[in-house]
Image (cartoon, rainbow, N blue to C red):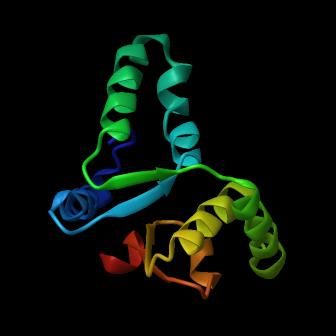
Amino acid sequence: MVESIPRYRDLTEAVFAWVKQPGNGAIASTIVVAELLVPLYKNPEDRGRASAAVLLLAKYPNLAWVDADFGIANRAAELRARYGLKTPDALHAATAIDAGVTGFVTNDAGYGRVQEFQTLQFEKLL
C-alpha cells in the first residue's frame, strides 16, 4: 500500500483482499497512520501519494480504526512491562486485545511474545 516490499506483496494483497470480503473485517490503531505516512510526508514530491493513501486508509472496506484511549494506553503499559514491547508496538497490541482479535498480522517478530492473540508473521508464512 504505502510501503511496497516485493517479498511480501502477494501475502499483503491476500490479507487486504480477505479484509474486503463481506463478513470479514480488521481493526487497526490510528497509530498505523502516523507510522505509514512518514516516508511520503518526508518527500515533497510524494504529497499527492500521501493524500491518496489517507483516502484509501480512511475508506478501506471492513477496516475499523480504533483510537488509543486511556484504557488502551494502560493496557499498553502492562504489555510493555510484560513483553518488553516498544511503546508503538504495545499500543498496537493493546488495541488488538481490546478489540478481541484472534490473529495479528505483522512482520515484526516481537509480537510473537504476546500470548493474548496469535501472531501471523509474513516471514514465517513464506
- Is residue 88 visible in the rendered structure shown here? yes
Task: Kindly give the residue lying farthest to the left in the view shown.
Answer: 22
User: Residue 18's x, y, as percent?
Assistant: 20, 65
User: Residue 76's x, y, as percent?
Assistant: 74, 66
- Is residue 86 visible in the rendered structure shown here? no
State the quadrant of the C terminus: bottom left
Horizontal relation, residue 13 to residue 1: left or right? left
User: Residue 112's x, y, as percent?
Assistant: 57, 81
Horizontal relation, residue 44 to residue 68: left or right? left
Q: Nearer the viewer, residue 15 or 70?
A: 70
Task: Kindly give the residue lying farthest to the bottom in the view shown.
Answer: 115
Position of residue 23 relative to residue 41, above or below, is below
Q: Quadrant of residue 88?
A: bottom right
State the quadrant of the N terminus: top left
Horizontal relation, residue 113 to residue 57: left or right? right
Task: Kindly give the residue lying farthest to the right in the view shown.
Answer: 81
Position of residue 43 relative to residue 78, above or below, is above
Q: Quadrant of residue 71?
A: bottom right
Q: Give me the residue at 59% from left, 46% from top.
A: 31
Horizontal relation, residue 110 to residue 9: left or right? right
Q: Give me the residue at 75% from left, 74% from top.
A: 79
Q: Give me the residue at 25% from left, 61% from top.
A: 19
Q: Give me the residue at 58% from left, 74% from top.
A: 97
Please count the marks in the image: 0
User: Residue 51's x, y, as percent?
Assistant: 38, 21
